[in-house]
Image: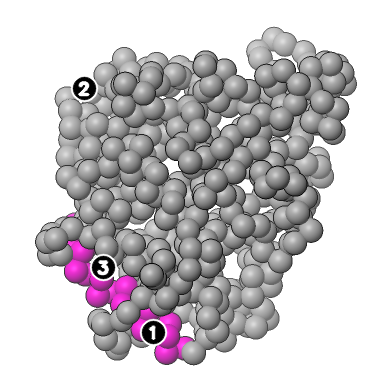
Amino acid sequence: MNQNLFAAVRNAFPENLDSVAIETADGPDAPRTWSWADIDRETARIANLIDSLRIPASSRIAVQTEKCVEALILYLGILRAGHVHLPLNTAYRAAEMEYFLSDAEPAVVVCSGVNLGWIAPLAAKAGCRHIFTLNEDGSGSLAECAAAFGVLQEPAARKAEDLAAILYTSGTTGRSKGAMLSHGNLLSNALVLKEYWGWRKDDVLIHALPIFHVHGLFVASHGALFCGARMIWFGKFSAPAVLSRLPEATVFMGVPTLYVRLLSEPSLTREACRKVRLFISGSAPLAIDTFEEWKSRTGHTILERYGMSETLMLTSNPYREEDGERRGGTVGFPLPGTGLRIVGEGEIGGIEVRGPNVFSGYWRMPEKTREEFTADGWFKTGVAAAVVPRQGSVLDPDRIRDFLRTEIAGFKVPKRVFVIPELPRNTMGKVQKNLLRERYRTVFSAFSGTETHEGQVRPEPGQSGL
């Protein structure tokens, strides 16, 4: 049985392949539409183009482009051809790109045309022989070359454990780590979320997130693709533009800053949200004030959840009322099939996880991989702390560590505690751990938390996720 993730995606397409799969909501040519048949045809062209390059099986294909539907089709085409998708943040500049390309050694690089001049030499230096351009409007050499290929292609045979994607994440040293995600990791998480969040074929998703990380590329896109639901596609987030299409939607996913921006718009009303069945927030902690104001303004309770590059989605507040209430300031319970335990004395300690969604290890870092897993196979999710005091409070790092030594096992106590006025965040509201590393040259946790509210996980200040 072929366990290629793309094969599973295609099997989930609706019976009517001519129905609309994706509609663009912004851009110079909006609206543009793609049917399910279009996705099938265009991913075949991409896969056939890649096959023509005669690159080794499971080669890495690095992608640093602006968000466009063609970039999503490229991702699916890479899977279809049996290679490894390597998405890179569009904010990365030369020094960062040089590191990623030299470390991953991709066989193919796809970048925006405006960046070709400085990325091409870096790609060549890393040994890459094939470079294509893909622009925000879908134009570029990738589209031009793919157009010459046929629309029939059988997805490459892959096993569940075969590599599908590499996501570079913040390291516990100055060196970024490439989390290796398999076809099985991605498929298992997508199917769990399909059931847990009640995805339906008549859903309409507003997709307003970037697609170079887990939240936008896997959680949002897979959610719609695996139930044959339509996506309303925004290349960039605009609160007024999103609100103009919200009455058509049934699902919206955003980061906390997007909810704050939507709340600033007078047109956010209960009537505008009348068809929406689910609002989801992730990638950063959602302020309780935002949680409560959203509920008051719209009548909807935001569902918060938590994940990591290494594990995809781990926990979620309940979707169905019979499964419990959604509580602000928490990220819910472990998802079905995901094991989560707190190691240490009492109720506070290090969080460890395992399950079919957990990655196999870090790219070309076998020793680091061994360090991050316990002897019985659980992934250890964090190590150091940056603390933001409440207004008017004064905190002593040494006293914090002294207190923790009395509450948890010594090896779980952070080696360093930094008290800072605020956490640096990017436009997505995500903590910029790279800036913290540069500032302190030390280790910061990817996740820390305590188990509260009958098993729900509460994110601590400074937690970041996907």
Is 419 on the left-hand or right-hand side of 114? right
Residue on which disc 2 sits: 270
Q: CA distance from mark 3 to mark 2?
A: 34 Å
Q: Are marks 3 and 2 in contact (CB under 8 Å)?
A: no
Residue in the image at 59% along x and 60% along y? 180
| Rendering quarter of residue 421 | top right
Range of magenta residues: 31-53
Residue on which disc 3 sits: 39
Q: Nearer the viewer, mark 1 or mark 2?
A: 1
Residue in the image at 53% along x and 29% along y? 285
Q: Nearer the viewer, mark 3 or mark 2?
A: 3
Visible in this render: residue 178?
Answer: yes
Where residue 182 appears, x then y in whole percent?
A: 52, 61
Where residue 94 appears, x then y in whole percent?
A: 65, 66
- Under tag 3, what secondary structure? helix
Residue on which disc 1 sits: 49
Looking at the picture, tell me which residue is in the foreground, 324 or 29. 324
